[in-house]
Image: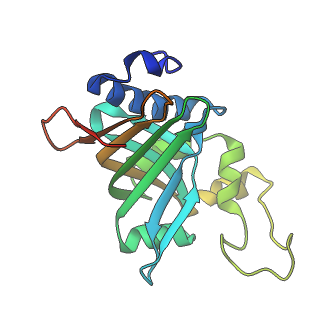
Amino acid sequence: MDISGIAAFADTLAAARADAWARFCEGVTNRRSPFHSPMIASVSPEGRPRVRVVILRGCEPARGLLRFHTDRRSAKFAELSARAEAAMTGYDAAAKIQVRVEGAVTLHVDDSVADAAWEGSRQFSRICYGTHPGPGSELAEAGAFTLPSADDDIAAGRANFCAVQLHVASLEWLYLAASGHRRAHFDLASEHPGRWLSP
């Protein structure tokens, strides 16, 4: 699908849903896509909202799945372990398209999903999981951490790696236009084709 011509089909529920997934899937393969680095929201142990940018690594519309990676030593991993729910938002300012999704997450650390995700990662990305000390650790000064350099040290980072799958339960697509905004909501567990909402 050509995701640049949204205005032509902004009044079609099916096209709005397809466009939302097309943007996420493009974000996986195109590093310049605004959907390559969406925001993910989780809840802290104290019940506070936490938001951060992630890099989108997988998109399976037929299964309603989005995938990103995290370090098992991170606060994000702890939060998602304690409360396996998250929300994700992507926004394309040029196209004036926002997509929000919510759903349950599954954390994959020592299984085939994690193995495939690790094997599919570039060496540069794997280096991050061998950082010492781990993410969020207090440092004496800004650069007081080390990155692995040898291949064996990079491979050892696999023990810190987690593939996170977001199982999309609901999806909202918003198109901002001077001629009239369009907002559509979809419940993926429902057979209902979706519904329009007031923007």
Q: Position of residue 48 (x, y in %)?
A: 46, 77
For the image shown, how many numbered marks are present on the structure?
Answer: 0
Instruction: Please tell me which residue lies in front, 103 or 137.
Output: 103
Instruction: Please tell me which residue lies in front, 193 or 45.
Output: 193
Q: Position of residue 110 (x, y in %)?
A: 42, 58
Give the quarter of the figure containing the C terminus: top left
Q: Position of residue 53 (x, y in %)?
A: 59, 54
Side (left or right) of 171 relative to 188? right
Q: Picture quarter containing residue 180?
A: top left
User: In the figure, 23 relative to 87: above or below?
Assistant: above
Instruction: Please tell me which residue lies in front, 171 or 58.
Output: 171
Side (left or right) of 145 relative to 44? right
Q: Picture quarter containing residue 187?
A: top left
Q: Position of residue 197 (x, y in %)?
A: 28, 42
Extreme residue toward the front, this view: 179
Here the colouring is: rainbow
Seen at 66% across and 32% down, the residue is 32
User: In the figure, 128 relative to 173: above or below?
Assistant: below
Q: Picture quarter containing residue 193?
A: top left
Give the quarter of the figure containing the N terminus: top left
Side (left or right) of 15 relative to 128? left
Instruction: Please tell me which residue lies in front, 3 or 131.
Output: 3
Seen at 53% across and 63% down, the residue is 51
